[in-house]
Amino acid sequence: MINAELRKINQMLPEFKGSNWLIRIPLAIVFIQQGFSKMPFDPSTAEAYGLSLIVWSMVIISELLAGFGLLFGGIFRSLGILSLIGDLLTRFSGSIIVCIISGVIIVSDPDSFVEVLLYDHIHVMLYCGGLFFALRGNRAK
C-alpha cells in the first residue's frame, strides 16, 4: 500500500532531462579556469611542484581539453548532431579529469587514503564528477 503511494508520488514529480548540465558546466569551468590560470607557461611553477616541463605542459593542455571537451560533448548531444562523437568526447574528458585529479592527489603526498577522503573534499568531488562522465558519457540525464 505505502509502496504504491510512493510510486504514484514519484511519477507525479517532473523529470529534468538536462540535469547533467548542473554538473557538467561547473566542472568544465573549474578545469578551463585552472588551465588558463597556468598561462603563460612558467617553468618555475613546474619546478615548484616537482614536475618536468613536459608533464606541466601536458597538465595545462589536459585541463583545457577536459573542460572544453565536456562542454562540446554535451552540446553535440543537445544539438543531435554527432551524438556518438559527443558521447566519446564526454567520456574522454571525464577520463582526463580522473587522471589529472589522481595526479594532483599523488603529488600532494597524503599520509593515507582516508586522509584524502576526509580532508581533500574538492579533489574528491572533482574526481567523482570526472568519473561520472567517464562512466556515463552523454547517457547521463
Image: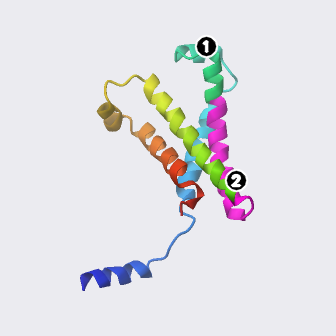
- What x and y, as percent, mark residue 47? 57, 13
Residue for point 69% across, 60% down: 83
Label 1 to label 2: alpha-carbon separation: 38 Å
Q: In which quarter of the image is residue 6?
A: bottom left
Q: Residues within 10 Å of mark 2 (few under 14, many from 20)?
A: some
Rendering colour mode? rainbow
What type is the residue that disc 2 sits on? Ile
Q: From what the image shows, is residue 75 above or below residue 29?
A: below
Look at mark 2 in the image and give the residue it sits on.
Answer: 85
Q: In which quarter of the image is residue 3?
A: bottom left
Name the main secondary structure of what is drawn in magenta. Answer: helix
19 or 54: nearer the viewer: 54
107 with respect to 89 (left or right): left
Q: Where the C terminus falls, by quadrant?
A: bottom right
**Magenta highlight range:** 60-83
- What x and y, as percent, mark residue 36? 66, 33
Q: Is residue 76 magenta?
A: yes
What type is the residue that disc 1 sits on? Ser
Look at mark 1 in the image and give the residue it sits on.
Answer: 44
- What x and y, as percent, mark residue 77? 67, 60
Q: Circle 2 sits in a helix, a strand or a loop, which is it?
A: helix
41 with respect to 106 (left or right): right
